[in-house]
Image (cartoon, rainbow, N blue to C red):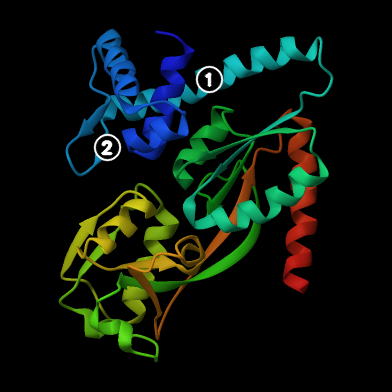
Amino acid sequence: MDIRHMKYFIAVAEELSFSKAAKKLNMSQPPLSKQIKDLEDVLNQKLFKRDNKKVELTEAGANLLFQSYKIVKDVEEIERYFNNLSDNNSAKLSIGFSETVLKDMVSVVKLYNKQYDDIDISIHKLSSPEQIISLENEFIDVGFICNPVVNAKYETLEINSHTYDLAVPHDHFITSRNSPVSLNELKDDNFIITPRSVSPAYYDAAFSVFHTNNFFPKNTITAYNTSAIIALIKAGLGISLLPSSIKALFANQDSVVFKEIGKTSEIDTAIVWDEHNSNPEVKKFIKFSKNFFQKSLKD
C-alpha cells in the first residue's frame, strides 16, 4: 500500500463512481478498480458497496476516508516542506466545497487565483459534514458549506442564501405551468431526498419547505449527491427539491426542468475555517472573500 492507493481511494469515495473517479484521475476504469481491489485485499476489508446502480462507502470505507485525508495531507505537508527548501513560490491552499455552494466558490476562487496566480490551489468536492472532519484532519484549509456549522470551534463567513426550486423531468405535467408550483399537486410523485447524514442543513431546509406547504411526500428515493439526483430525475424515477444555485449547473440539461415553488424556504451558504490554521494563505483568502462578497451584495 502506498500514497497512490490513498489518492485513488479518495477519488472514488468523493465521486461515488468508478468511471467518474477514473476520468478525474486521467486513467481508465479497469486499473482503478484493480487498485481499489488490491487495497481492499491488503486491509482485508470491503471499502465499497457497489451494484449496477450505485456505489456506497461501507463503514470501514467511511473510517478509512477520514484517515486517508490525514495521510495525504501529511504527505503533502512533507513534500511542501522540502520543496520550500528550494522553491520560495510554493504557497498552497486546499479548498473543500459542496455542490450547493459550487457557484459561490467558483466566483471567488476564480478572481482570487487571477490576483494570486503564484498559489497552488487544490479543490475537493465534499459534503458539509465531510468538510468539518477534513478541517479537523487538516486535509482542507477552508470549506464552502451549507450553514449552520454544528462545531463552534470553527469560524464562518456567511456568503449567500438560496431558495428551493422543484426539479422535474422534461415531460412532467407541471412543466407547462407558468405560475409557481403548489406541492400539493404532486402527492403521487416520488421525491428524491438526500439523507440528513450527508447534509443536515440541506435536508432540514428541504423539509422546511414540505412543512411550510403542509405537505409530506408519500414515496421517497434516497440519493447521496446532486449528480445522482439529476440522473434519477432524467430517468423519470422522481422529482426533487434543489437549491436554486444548482439550477445554473444544469442549465443545459434539456431533460430536466426547474420550476419555482409557491411557498419555498432558504438555505444559507458559508465559508468555514479554523482560525488557528498556520497556513498564512487562509487569512489572505478569507480577507479577499469578505471583500468580494460584500461587494457582490452591494452590486
Q: Nearer the viewer, residue 187 or 212?
A: 187
Q: Which mark is residue 82?
A: none
Q: Residue at x 41, y 73 (%)?
A: 165
Across and down, in percent, residue 220 comes to 20, 62
Label 1 Cα crowd, 10 Å radius (few <14 / some 14-19 / many 20+): some
Q: Quadrant of residue 82?
A: top right
Residue 134's place in the image compared with 173, above or below, is above
Residue 269's place in the image compared with 71, above or below, is below
Residue identified by numbered label 2? 56
Q: Mark 2 or mark 1: name the one nearer the start of the chain.
A: 2
Label 2 element class: strand
Label 1 element class: helix
Residue identified by numbered label 1? 72
Amino acid residing under circle 1: Val
The answer to whether residue 89 of the structure is visible from this angle is: yes
Q: Residue at x 48, y 47 (%)?
A: 128
- Name the quarter where the C terminus is drawn: bottom right
Q: Is residue 163 left or right of residue 116?
A: left
